Image (cartoon, grey):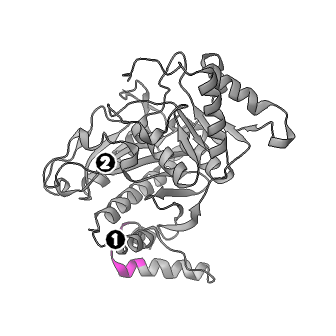
Amino acid sequence: MKWCCLIANSVNIHDICIKSTKTQNSTTQMKTLIQFINEMQTSNPFATGQFTRLLNDIGIASKIVNREINKAGLSHTMGETENTNVQGETQKKLDVFANEQFLNALRFGGACAAVVSEEEDEAIIFDNELSNQGRYVVAIDPLDGSSNIEVNVSIGTVFAIYKRNSEPGKPADETDILQVGTNLVAAGYVIYGSSTMMVFSTGQGVNGFTYDPSVGLFLLSHPNMTIPDNGNIYSINEANYIYFADGVKEYIKYCQEDDKKTNRPYTTRYIGSLVADFHRNLIRGGIYIYPGTTKQPMGKLRLLYECIPAAFLAEQAGGKASDGFKRILDIHPYTIHQRSPLFVGSKKMVEKAEYFMERLSKNFCEFPIKEN
C-alpha cells in the first residue's frame, strides 16, 4: 500500500491512505497536502488545477529524494562527482540525483514551462507541447546543504514558483523567471531531517506538512506557522569574521553582550544548511545571516532560489528579510545565478542588524553590480 500511495492519483487509493491514518490516530483526521491545495483552489474561480499539479509534482520528487537520502549510507550515492556546477562547487552524487528527480517531475507534469536550478548552467526550457501549456516557472535548489550529507545532518530543497509572463502555448524563456520576489505565486522548502517536512506559502500564511512514510503522504502538521518578533538565536559562519563588514561585526558583538533586559547574550546555532537554520529559527525565533564579505561582496547565497524563497516565507510568517540595506523581495534579478547577502528571521533582530549596517557599513554595498 505504501508504494500505491506514493504514485497513485486515484481518489480510492487516496481514501484508503486517509483511513489508514485515521486508524492510527482515531482522534484526528489529518489534512493532506493535496486536500489543502484543492481547498485553496476552489476559492479561486479562475483556477485551472495546474498549480495543484505542480505542487504535487514537487511533492512526489521530494519523496523520491527523501528515500534516497535515507539509504545513502547503504547505496552508492554518497561522495562527490567529477563535475562542478556553475558556481564552481563540486557536485555531490546526491546533488545530481536530486536535480534529475525534480527536473523529470516538472518536465512531465505539464504545469511547468521552465526551470532554473542551482545545478544547471542555463535555464531549462521544456519545449514540448505539454509543457508549453504550463502557466508556471520554477527556481529551485534541489539539495541545499549537500556538504552535510556524509555527516548525516539535515539538508533540504528550496523552491520558488512564478506565473510566467510569456503566453502559454509557446516555449517560455529566461525572462519568465527573472522576476522580482513580489511576483511570487508560492515558495517553500522541504527539510530532510528527523522527519521530512514540506513548508510552503502561497501568500496566505505559512503551513508545514510532515511526510508520513507509512501512507506516503504529506500531512498538515504545522498550520499557520509564525516566527516570533524576537529571538535569542543568531546563525552565522563566524569563521569569516575578519572578512565581514563593520556593521556585521558590531551586530555579532551586540548579540554576545550580557544584558538581561534583552535576554542577551544570544545563542549561536549554525548548521551550514540554509533550510535547516531557517527552519529552526522560523519555529523558535532567531536570525540567519549570510552577509557579503570583502572576498565576496555579494555573499554566497543565490537570490532566485535561496534568498527570495526564504524572504517570502519569513514575511508570510511575520518576519523580515533584507540584504542588510533593502528588502530582498524588492531586488530585481538580472542573471539566474545572481547572489545576494541575506539577513532573515525575526523582525526585530533583522531590524537591529540593519541598524548596525546602516550606521557602520553604508558604503559596503558599493561593489560591482554584476558578479557570478
Q: Nearer the viewer, residue 251 or 136?
A: 251
Could you tell me how far apart the alpha carbons at marks 1 and 2 are, in whole angstroms? 28 Å
Task: Say which quarter of the image contains residue 64.
Answer: bottom left
Image coordinates of residue 81 in percent, x first then y, are 40, 30
> Residue 34 magenta-drawn?
no
Dot 2 falls on a residue whose secondary structure is helix
Q: Magenta span covers which residues?
A: 7-14
Which residue appears at 31% of the width and 39% of the height? 178
Across the whole image, how many numbered discs are drawn on residues? 2
Q: Quadrant of the C terminus?
A: top left
Lower position in the chain sequence, tag 1 or tag 2: 1
Question: Relative to 145, is 26 on the left or the right?
Answer: right
Q: Amino acid at mark 1?
A: Asn
Q: Nearer the viewer, residue 181 or 200?
A: 181
Numbered badge on residue 44: 1
Image coordinates of residue 34 in percent, x first then y, are 41, 69
Q: Which residue is mark 2?
A: 103
Category of crowding for the residue at label 1, using alpha-carbon neighbours closer than 10 angstroms: few (below 14), some (14–19), many (at least 20): few
> Residue 10 magenta-drawn?
yes
Up-down relation of residue 72 to residue 212 (above or below): above
Numbered badge on residue 252: none
Image coordinates of residue 86 in percent, x first then y, are 35, 27
Q: Amino acid at mark 2?
A: Leu
Question: Relative to 181, is 115 on the left or the right?
Answer: left
Which residue appears at 57% of the width and 64% of the height? 224
- Main secondary structure type of the part rendered in magenta: helix
- Residue found at the very far front of the displayed protein: 359
Up-down relation of residue 368 to residue 126 (above or below): above
